[in-house]
Image (cartoon, grey):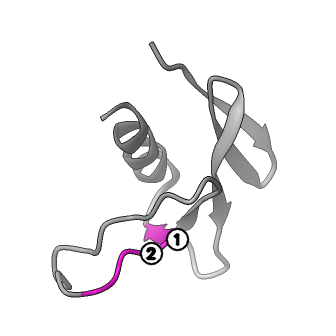
Amino acid sequence: MASITWNVTPPVHTALLDDVPVCTLKPKDIGGFTASWLDGRLWAPPSHMPKAAPQPTRFFMGLEDAKAAVEQTLLG
């Protein structure tokens, strides 16, 4: 089974899937965090913009929300 761990090098949090970096979470000056895939994955468009193209980066209001979304995407 896949294992997700977090490497924290303030202020960046990096998700490791079986020790391979797959996503970084970086704080924004305006608040919140961006989650950027490192392995070619794309975030689905937001529900309020269903026709938008998938993107490699997505904004989250909080760190825990971002981590939860990354883990849910990776573990399905």
Residue 5: which numbered mark, if any? none
**Left or right, residue 44 beside residue 31:** left
Residue sticking out furthest to the right: 9
Residues drawn in magenta: 52-60
Label 2 element class: loop
**Left or right, residue 62 beside residue 5:** left
Q: What amino acid type is highlighted by mark number 2?
A: Gln
Position of the N terminus by quadrant:
top left
Q: Position of residue 49 (x, y in %)?
A: 20, 85
Identify the image quadrant of residue 30.
bottom right
Label 1 element class: strand
Residue visible at 19% across and 87% down? Answer: 51
Q: With respect to residue 62, does 14 lie above or below?
A: above
**Left or right, residue 65 beside residue 24:** left
Closer to the camera in the image, 58 or 64: 58
Q: Position of residue 35 (x, y in %)?
A: 55, 61
Q: With respect to residue 53, does 68 lie above or below?
A: above
Residue visible at 61% across and 53% down? Answer: 39
Q: Position of residue 14 (x, y in %)?
A: 69, 44
Residue 55: which numbered mark, if any? 2
- Discs 1, 2 touching: Cβ within 8 Å: yes
Residue visible at 56% across and 73% down? Answer: 31
Residue visible at 74% across and 35% down? Answer: 7
Q: Position of residue 16 (x, y in %)?
A: 65, 34
Position of the C terminus by quadrant:
top left
Q: What amino acid type is highlighted by mark number 1?
A: Thr
- Which residue in the protein does label 1 denote? 57
The reply to whether the magenta stretch includes residue 56 is: yes
